[in-house]
Image: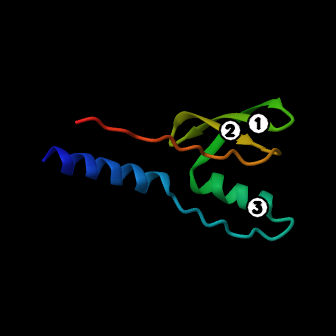
Amino acid sequence: MKILYIIYLFLIIIIKADKVRVYQRIPQNFVATSVYHFLKENDINNCFAFEESNSQLLLKCLRYNKLTNVEINIYNGPYKKIHYTGLSIVV
């Protein structure tokens, strides 16, 4: 029974780590419209903005009448590579 639990846990970890993301093309000059629709669909409104840096905008907004933090970040560097570590179990 213990082995089945360990195998089940291992499979859950593998499934969660291998998340597929499909990016959809946004036509040129329609990025602002796309962001606007995302904010509207998530009921993000009545915001205060603070520009932390040239690549980060922090917002404090109401969402469903509750205060919510919203961040818009720009990453210019290379993508971070995920390093997986080994798992060893001693029974």
The image shows residue 60 at horizontal and vertical percentages of 65, 32
The foreground one among 80 and 44 is: 80
Alpha carbon of mark 2 to alpha carbon of mark 1: how far?
A: 6 Å
Amino acid of disc 1: Leu
Amino acid of disc 3: Thr
Q: Is residue 66 above or below residue 76?
A: above
Q: Nearer the viewer, mark 1 or mark 3?
A: 1
Amino acid of disc 2: Glu
Q: Earlier in the sequence, mark 2 or mark 1?
A: 1
> How did the renderer colour the structure?
rainbow
Q: Which residue is mark 2?
A: 71
SS class, disc 1: strand
The image shows residue 52 at horizontal and vertical percentages of 79, 28
Q: Which residue is mark 1?
A: 57
Q: Which residue is mark 3?
A: 33
Q: Earlier in the sequence, mark 3 or mark 2?
A: 3
Q: Is residue 11 above or below residue 86?
A: below
Where residue 23 sits, quadrant-wise, is bottom right
SS class, disc 3: helix
Q: At x 64% / y 51%, what residue is drawn? A: 39
